[in-house]
Image: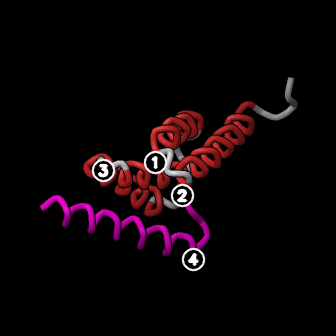
Amino acid sequence: MSNQPAETTAQGSAEERAKRAWAHFANREYESALVEFREALTADAHLLDAVYGFAMTLRYKGESEKAIKAFEQVVKMIEEGAVKDANRVEMLERLARSHIRHLKQAAS
């Protein structure tokens, strides 16, 4: 049995799943990526990289409405202070807002 607290173990599991999900995404294995991102978010709903990856995967699958909601969740998490690194905050927020804008424009 691990000496790590369950929270740490779950976090590690979430991060590992998110890494696997990003590998699937890079290989254009979008269904597998979605499964792994969902599992990562089940383990840690506040793992921003998994939320962003989930949104990106939905976008690439053509599920625009779901992708917009997921990108909006990224922006909300950033606004609530989920990321402490100022450079990363700025980059992720710009990217998420850009995706939202493009998806909404494409839908209209």
* Percent of width and height locating residue 43: 59, 35
Q: Bin the neighbour count of mark 4 within 10 Å (Cα to Cα): few under 14, some 14-19, many 20 and up.
A: few
Residue range in magenta is 83-108
The residue under the point 87% across, 31% down is 3
| Observer-nearest of 75 and 26 | 26
Label 4 sits on residue = 87
Marks 4 and 2, how far apart in space?
13 Å
Q: How far apart are marks 1 and 2 (CA)?
A: 17 Å
From the image, tell me which residue sits under label 2.
Answer: 82
Residue reaching furthest to the left: 108
SS at mark 2? loop
Does the magenta stretch mainly form a helix, a strand or a loop? Answer: helix
**Numbered mark located on residue 62 in the image:** 3
Per the image, the residue denoted by label 1 is 54
The kind of secondary structure element at disc 1 is helix
Which kind of residue does numbered mark 1 sit on?
Answer: Phe
Circle nearer the viewer, 1 or 2: 1
Does 39 sit above or below residue 94?
Answer: above
